[in-house]
Amino acid sequence: MYALLALTATVLTSLLPILNKQILRDARPALVAWAINAFSLPILALGTFLLTQCTLTPFSCTTRLPQVDGIFIIALLASVVLNWGATLLSTYALAKADASLVSPLLTFNPAFTLLIAWFAIAETPGLRETIGVAVVLFGAYLLEVEEARTGLLAPLRVLLHRPGALLAIIASALWGATTVLEKLAIEHMTPPSGPFVALIGTVLMVVLLTPNAFLSSGKTDTPEEKRGLHGLRFHPRAFLLAVLIAGIAPLFGFTAIALGLVGYVAALFKLSAVFTIMWAWLFLGEENIRQRLLGAVVMLIGGAIIAL
């Protein structure tokens, strides 16, 4: 069940880089990151209420607040801070580089997640799952496979020198730790609830993103970036769809985190890069799709190894 939930969240979130890329043409990265998360809160709140406070047979709703402890608070606050940093960095990376390049680079975080989860919450990886994660990461290496003719490490050097690539890798590392902390928070609440953690975490992250969204440097902003909230109106359909996905996808994703091993769930999330590459080719006309698709297919195989 956790694999199906994770894959559903993956397909939905694979569209976000494409939508963000369109919106970023006329709005600042920090503002885009804030607006999508802020406007998704009502959808996320309604979904959380229905999933945690209501029953279907018979349909009835009661308010039951979960019990939490000190570890929950520490883990949640730490995950929010890291998520805030990763969200800003990944959005700035999208503003600088192709979505078909940035999205796969965010697949490095299962390696960080698997390692951190091993020590932090004693989730010992099995051989098959570890192989699956390794295959996913190898697929990311193949994104610049044509450069391997000049040296084994050449693809990595090319990635690091591309605009926005380093920001994406740092964001990936931060998200690797974030997933473990979110899992820890879920385990230290009664009853466990992934959607509840998603809701509270998003609220706090929106608060942290607010200064970045509305305080900008006039020295670096281009005329297009100075449009502020008006810049979001240039792409209303893209913005509304991004808000809808940002409100729904966490309900699936955090439930998967609550049910499955966090290292494996995080690896499945990263399959969104496979779909993002295809969307970037179809909707944005980005180039170098053939070589990036090779890496994406390898990543898909790795995800299948984990899910089977």
Image: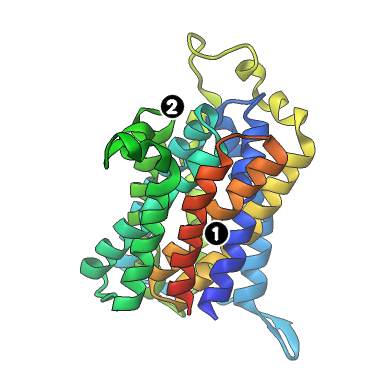
Depth check: give the residue in front, 207 or 275. 275
Residue 272, position in %: x, y?
Answer: 55, 55
> Residue drawn 49% across and 31% down?
92
Quarter of the image where one finds residue 39: top right
Residue 306, position in %: x, y?
Answer: 43, 73
Residue 223, position in %: x, y?
Answer: 63, 11
Quarter of the image where one finds residue 56: bottom right
> Residue drawn 53% across and 31% down?
30
Q: How many marks?
A: 2
Helix, strand or loop at label 2? It is loop
Colour option used: rainbow
Q: Please, is residue 94 above or below residue 266 in the view?
A: above
Q: Please, is residue 49 above or below residue 76 in the view?
A: below
Q: Viewer-nearest of labels 1 and 2?
A: 2
Q: Residue furthest top?
A: 219
Q: Is residue 177 left or right of residue 190?
A: left
Q: Is residue 214 left or right of residue 295?
A: right
The residue wearing badge 1 is 199
The residue wearing badge 2 is 163
> Residue drawn 62% across and 67% down?
8
Q: Is residue 87 left or right of residue 278?
A: left
Few, some or many C-alpha atoms within 10 Å of disc 1 (few <14, some 14-19, many ≥20)? many
Residue 79, position in %: x, y?
Answer: 37, 54
Q: Residue furthest front?
A: 149
Q: Is residue 278 visible?
A: yes
Question: Label 1 is placed on what type of residue?
Answer: Leu
